[in-house]
Amino acid sequence: MRDPDLTVTVSGIRLRTPLILASGCCGYGKEMERIEGWDWSAVGAVVLKGITLEPRLGHPPHRVAEVASGMINSIGLQNVGLAGLVQLINEELHCLPVPLIANVAGRTVEEYQKICDGLKKAPSLAAVELNISSPNIRGGGIEFGRDPEMAAQVVQACKEVWTKPLWVKLSPEPDRMVAIAQACVEAGADALTLCNTFPALTLNSQSLFPRPILSMGFGGLSGPAIKPIILRKAFLVCRWLREQSLRTPVIGSGGVWTGRDVLEYLAVGCHSVQLGTVLFADPLAPQRIARELKDYIKKVVAATGQEQWLNVESFRGVAMKELSECVGGPVG
């Protein structure tokens, strides 16, 4: 039996595996090379730490708290800013052996557009991922990702200046997830990442009286706890795309810990996944998960006698028909 093929294509970018390092969980990528045993061969791409127009120091500590089945973070978008990232890419990061994706956050449509325009000075970037969970300071502080019209405005403005693939990372909160996704796709999004972290709270109950652990009180919940929720949202968006005969790729992001987690996201229609919180618990997770994927694929081929399953892309959407029959018509 030949070795399973883990290569996938997302918005025209060929990835050696469907495993993408999520923004904010691997620094600017090069930090991972300090880890003993690190190997890029299992990584499909890396999404760089999110940037804003100007450098940010982020929130004061404490900024991270471990909770059951995950963690809550409130980093505050600490980053080197647009000019700093462009310099870092051109001087160092362009040598990394994987596609580089920049993650962009802004406070206005104009800021998003200006950052995307400035990133053209870093030609080795393969794509941009928009973080539309940022509050719109000109729209009353409402997150761009909560409103279809505002989300579309950001995507459309960025498409005017950015000619390479444009990914959009959606907020997990809106009940109208499909409507937000539709607005982004119609505005020109080349791929959708589902989703960002969930707003959450944790308290220190070991003190005399429970008190906040994080300096800002609230933070974003990530890890295995959110996977079933994101998996449902990913299915709903993938089903809508299929119904519309659209081929916009969906990237599942939330709670991926094992090879089977990857297969679940692929089964509901995703093209690839992002690895985030798992990297804090197991920095060498990409290698392990890639091995688990290959072992699972070999078992499927051995059980069925069908070599078509040696290509990981064959698993995309295998659960959609049965799921659609289970849940019936349009769901939330």
Image (spheres, rainbow, N blue to C red):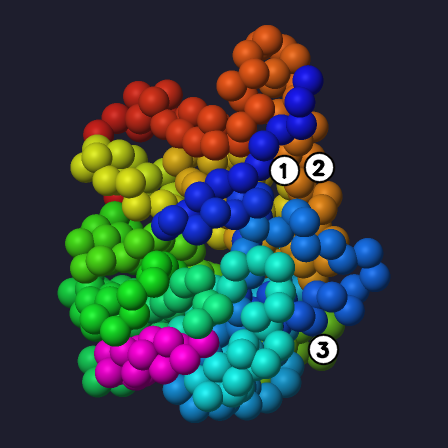
Residues in magenta, as a range: 106-122
* Amino acid type, mark 1: Gly
Q: What's the amino acid at mark 2?
A: Arg
Disc 1 designates what residue?
A: 259
Pointer 3 residue: 207
Total marks shown come to: 3
- Which dot, 2 or 1, sits closer to the camera? 2
Q: Position of residue 237 (x, y in %)?
A: 30, 43
Front position among marks 3 and 1? 1
Judging by the rendered image, the residue that carries numbered circle 2 is: 291
Residue 10 percent across, percent down from the top left = 42, 47
Q: Residue at x 21, y 35 (%)?
A: 245
Point out the image quarter for the C terminus: top left
Q: Dividing the image into 4 quarters, which one contains the N terminus?
A: top right
- Check disc 3 and give the amino acid type: Ser
Between 134 and 103, which is closer to the camera in this rendering? 103
* Alpha-carbon span between mark 3 and mark 1: 39 Å
